[in-house]
Amino acid sequence: MKYEILPWLILFLPLLSVAVITLFTLRSKTTSSLISIGAVVAGFVLSIIFIGANGFHPAVMEISKNWLTIGDLQIDFGLKLDALSLMMLLIVTGVGGAIHIYSYGYMRDDEGFSRFFAELSLFTFSMLGIVLANNFIEMFIFWELVGVSSYLLIGFWFEKPSAGDAAKKAFIVNRLGDFGFLLGILMIWGILGSLNFGELQNGMASNATALGTMATIAGLLIFCGAVGKSAQFPLHVWLPDAMEGPTPVSALIHAATMVAAGVYMLCRILFLLNADALHVIAYIGGFTSLLAALIAVQQNDIKRIIAYSTLSQLGYMVMAVGLNGPTPAMFHLTTHAFFKALLFLSAGSVIIGMHHEQDIWHMGNLRKKMPITFWTFLIGALALSGIPPFAGFYSKDSILAQALEQKSYLLFTVAVFVAGLTAFYTFRLFFVVFSGKEKSEHASHAHESPLVMTLPLVALAIFAAVGGFIGITNNYGSQFAADHETLSFAQQLIEPLHAPIAMFIGIAVALAGIYLAFSLYKNATSDPLPAKLGVLATWMKNKFYFDELYEATFVRAHDFIAAVCDWIDRWLVEGFCIGLVRGGTDLTGRALRLVQTGNLQTYAFLFVLGVALVLYFVLK
Amino acid sequence: MHVGLEHYLTVSFLLFALGLLGVIMRRNLLVIYMSLELMLNAANLALVAFSRFNDKLDGQVLVFFIITVAAAEVSVGLALIVALYRRRQSAHVEDLTSMKL
């Protein structure tokens, strides 16, 4: 294998950038940002060079160094290099690079500019670690690192209490999932005796029932990790709140990469999941996508709508994994990274143009004022809605086709319904923001963003437009199926025709959704839906009261346990045990202090008394 | 009347007790100092008496050392008292309680 050093460089350049920025260049904004952008762009270029030299299936799939050995547990620090990780490498560094450059424009007036770029680089490093990890322990370490850097980035404006709370919420909810993940890892190690993905895969291939009766439980425990990171029901509540972070963060972490980590992990360890586990995964994914899509319909914050849409699309991907379709899942993950990052960044451009206004009902008619943003957003919206020939159409269609192929008609219906809803809420957002009348003073004075922000938009827009037929499925297909045949460019273009029912239904509901949004919101100045839907709209608007439900049950129960622990700590440990020792020492000290009169002659007297006592006892 | 070891030791004990009483009771540093010397000399007397009655010279040798050390100690001690007096304008022990917190 050529250029073996490159993957190491790609992984560690961002870490180097974190070190340099935090240690040396925190004062210099431009230098810091250039170092950080340089690290991720260099990673992108090096990835292309590496793939150019070795192809998507390198001769050596794994390079690893022994990290530590405890008894018969040997943990490697290694890099897994196959089509799956190399594609993810391109996405993380490519989309990440565009977002880094965009951040240079978006964050330019911020106090913590250098800190922001250091944290972005830390995140990039952690994410690359997840992608390249060749064993469970290494992946788990980077998994947690991603959690930490996401915590830092969500709470970037920590002086706002809401941002601090959101950061904590994201971290704690993620930890809940990670707890299950860790249990799953331990279980796998306990039963199979290995943590290396390659070895596990070989082991499972030679003995498919190696996990025995624990197979379903182990699979679901590992899935817990994905539920946390990819924000699936019931741990979905952190993602919308995470929108408190700066918009580039939302684009990078909560659209393109971090939330995709769960789906990526499931695809990486797909061989460990048995049919029952996959079944549960598919239904949780489907339910999440439906739930989130319903909530998105009645949100009014531009970023929150996109956040719920992300939840919904993640549900789609998880559902695809559960339907035993890793290729469609990863395909959708990739195109979603393009168009969702694009939508977030366009939304960021709108927010900057509107002077930090995020309520869509204060916008309107931005088409003329922000032409580039308008076009890029439109492309993103069309891709998200699944209109041919944009990227989202191909990936969404492959998931629908997978559902049909697996004869899972319930999930197929859900997916179709969600596709319609997706088109509806996306274009609701689009029409309210970009057409109609200006609904506030700011909207009339909005302005287009600078070139450093619009260029990444255009780059992402190109990929969101053509991502469906540039060979992405070929790479993933060759990873997951040995007999996968490589499709030519033209074959990819007409690939959806293999499942015409899925394709025509998909296009039909998308168009219906767009038409409905057009007729309801083209010139609307307020939302007409609540009047029509009644109670349902209130439930959607309040996110089906999940936050309140968790508040009333888990948070309250947790508070109660915490109060009991606090009481025990305060009165039993602190008051009784420690208090006794402390009080005793204190009392003795006070008594002995009386002896210290400071009078020379008293000391002399006591001294003599002491001598007399000693003499008495010695001579007795 | 025959003067034996007991008599010497009794005198020595009385001298020592007087000196100790002086150290404990008197207020003036100089007097305390003199009392200390008294205690040293009481010890000297006892040593010489033991030496005489046991027919050994070790005790007398020790006395010479004590006299030498006492002389050195007096010179240092008096110098300290003078210095203290110059600083505090007093040589009374009740004024010297700065060791107490």
Image (cartoon, helix red, strand yellow):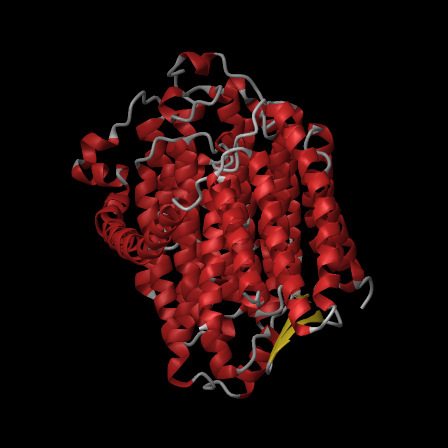
Residue A602 point in image, percent of width and height: 45, 44
Q: Look at the picture and state if A295 lies above or below A88.
A: above
Q: Residue at x 31, y 53 (%)?
A: A579
Q: Position of residue A466 (x, y in %)?
A: 61, 45
Residue A466 visible to the viewer: no
Residue at image coords 40%, 69%? A221
Along the line of sight, the residue nearer the viewer: B24 or A65: B24
A240 over A494 or under it: above or below = above
Please say if B15 is above or below A67. Answer: above
Given residues A227 and B32, the one toward you in this image is B32
| Residue A233, quarter of picture | bottom left
Residue at 52% across / 21% down in the picture? A353
Specify whether A467 is left or right of A38: left
Residue A387 locus on image (x, y percent): 47, 44
Query: Going by the picture, which residue comes out furthest to the right?
Result: A2
Front one among B8 and B26: B8
Q: Taking A99 as reference, is A242 left or right?
A: left
Q: Is residue A546 left or right of residue A373?
A: left
**Residue A591: where, in percent of width, then height?**
35, 48
> Which of the pair B72/A393 is nearer the observer?
B72
